[in-house]
Amino acid sequence: MLQAFLLAEKAFKQDEIPVGAVVVQENRIVGRGYNQVEQLKDPTAHAEMIAITAACDTLSTKYLTDCTLYVTLEPCTMCSGAIVWSKLKRVVFGALDEQSGGCGSQFNIAQNKNLNHQTEVIHGIMEEDCRYLLKKFFEARR
């Protein structure tokens, strides 16, 4: 989670919403990402999407069944869909996204029994740090 947080700080320094993510397989980071929506002018360039794409590229597969995604903010519905489609084993996140969370706070796409895959969800890891970085980012823009 610390590596994801460091990526969130990188996003913060680039005036992106500070979210960072890493995909881990057997204690090895196989994918990294941080929000690049503004930089790439791409609304889908979320940390999770970039990290999942990088992991699939690294492992030469579309399924990440033995991998864990660590992310500083609860994935949105789009990213939660990607989590299900990539068949990630587990997602671990820091802060809840009370507005558009897709892993339990607003929606629970990652564990929806109507879909062909359910992902284990763990939250609250480094929650205070993750929340503080987001708060600092948004306070500077108001």
Image: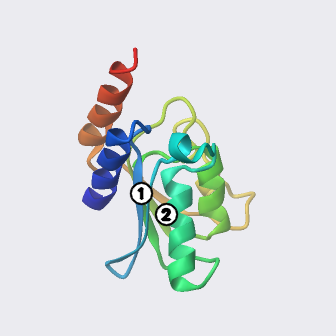
In the rendered image, which residue does mark 2 sit on? 51
Task: Describe the element under mark 2 as helix, strand or loop.
Answer: helix
In the rendered image, which residue does mark 1 sit on? 21
Please report the residue visible at 32 percent of the width from the left and 49 percent of the height from the top: 10
Position of residue 125 in the picture relative to residue 100 (left or right): left
Residue 138 appears at what percent x and percent y? 38, 24
Position of residue 87 in the picture relative to residue 6 (left or right): right
The single residue placed furthest to the bottom in the displayed view is: 60
Please report the residue visible at 65 percent of the width from the left and 48 percent of the height from the top: 78
Position of residue 72 in the picture relative to residue 126 (left or right): right
At label 1, counting other C-alpha atoms closer than 10 Å, the crowd grade (few under 14, some 14-19, many 20 or more) is many
Marks 1 and 2: CB-CB under 8 Å?
yes
Mark number for residue 142? Answer: none
Task: Describe the element under mark 1 as helix, strand or loop.
Answer: strand
Please report the residue visible at 61 percent of the width from the left and 82 percent of the height from the top: 61
Applied colour scheme = rainbow
The image quadrant that residue 113 belongs to is: bottom right
Against 131, residue 79 (above or below) is: below
- For the C terminus, the image quarter is top left
What is the three-letter code of the residue carrying label 1? Answer: Ala
- For the N terminus, the image quarter is bottom left
